[in-house]
Amino acid sequence: MSDLPSSSQGKKSPWIAITMGDAAGIGPEIIAKAFAQQPVLMRNCFVAGDLAAMQRACELIDKEKSSSWNAARISQPKEVLTRNEKVIPVLQVGESLKPVSWGRVSPLAGEFSGRCVTWAAQAALRGEIAALVTAPINKEALAAAGEPYQKYPGHTELLQVLAAQHTNQPIADMPVRMMLANDELRTVLVSIHLSLREALAAVTYDSVLQTIQITHQALSRMLGRKPRIAVAGLNPHAGEGGMFGREEIDVIAPAIQTAQSQGCDISGPWAPDTVFMRARAATGKLAEFDVVVAMYHDQGLIPVKYLGVEQGVNVTLGLPLVRTSPDHGTAFDIAGQGLADAASLVAAVRMAVKLA
């Protein structure tokens, strides 16, 4: 496996690694398109992936746009500064990936995607890269890859474990949360990849308060000021005074009160069917809130994705590294057809540059 140079001199690395994602999906294609469409933005970026898979993606976009881009192997990130125009720098992570078919679940592609994320996360934790941007992985392929990846439902859980191992902390002491954001709306989730039944059980005083605290800390750094946080209720009409459930009264409101006593600018619980509209920074409209804390995965993600999945960015909060990703999956149904839109990946790179 390739090694990066040490950053022991204390200088902050400017390099951003883009993990290739599942080679059978649209990850390599959108990466190639991002380099072709936004060469200035991508000037400090390199791909942590497979050279042959990225060359195949270059040939795909060449066929569609006659852009004449190629992939070239690098041995360390600083070589991006000396690369030729229309060349995508690829740092080969371990052994080459055997060719996989577009649009099909492949344990080989799943293992390689997990390998790339592991490598980039460890490089970021060592301070050798400024951030990682993760192209989409396929959860079924990741599970089919076997140990150690089959136990992780997605990027977030894998990154949490790697960060905890690096800092010699128990997993419980490395709480993370998913924030989905676009130009109009931000939302942070109390729970992510759980069944709905499990997600409802995960709405506890401690989990809600911890989510609020992580959101407050992360958004304070991002915005340079105290964020205005709205908390969504769990039940219709935020429980309607206990008529439709008592979670708001017994769990959510007490967590909000504790956060207020700790100095957070926070309010709620608000009716979940209207709070996202109030937090939306639409054209000509000043949003009431900077972020909404949502109680479970779909409650928070549906409004963000409805506003435009191509502009959404996933940011992992609570980690000792910067990680962003596009707000979509591997899109096996269009993989290899040249139809994938790179806008969300471009937005994720732009966010990573800002945060790093």
Image (spheres, rainbow, N blue to C red):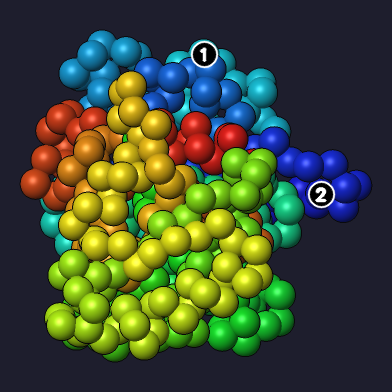
- In the depicted structure, whether residue 295 falls above or below residue 52: below
Q: Which residue appears at 73% of the width and 59% of the height?
A: 126
Residue 12 image position (x, y, % from top left)? 78, 42
Residue 81 image position (x, y, % from top left)? 66, 23
- In the depicted structure, whether residue 144 falls above or below residue 33: below
Label 2 to label 1: alpha-carbon separation: 27 Å
* SS class, disc 2: loop
Dot 2 crowding, Cα within 10 Å, few <14, some 14–19, many 20+: few
Residue 73 image position (x, y, % from top left)? 53, 36
Q: Which residue appears at 38% of the width and 27% of the height?
A: 34
Q: Is residue 167 visible?
A: yes
List the residue tagged with mark 2.
7
- In the depicted structure, whether residue 244 falls above or below residue 330: below
275 vs 90, left or right, is left
* Marked residue nearer the N-terminal end (2 or 1): 2
Residue type of the residue flagged with mark 2: Ser
Residue 112 picture quarter? bottom left
Residue 55 picture quarter? top left
- In the depicted structure, whether residue 267 falls above or below residue 55: below
Dot 1 crowding, Cα within 10 Å, few <14, some 14–19, many 20+: few
Residue type of the residue flagged with mark 1: Glu
Image quadrant holding the N terminus, namely: bottom right
Identify the residue at the far left of this view.
333
Q: Is residue 150 visible?
A: no
155 vs 76, nearest the viewer: 155
215 vs 280, nearest the viewer: 280
Disc 2 + disc 1, Cβ < 8 Å: no
Q: Nearer the viewer, mark 2 or mark 1?
A: 2
List the residue tagged with mark 1.
85
Q: Which residue appears at 72% of the width and 50% of the height?
A: 128
Residue 116 image position (x, y, % from top left)? 47, 57
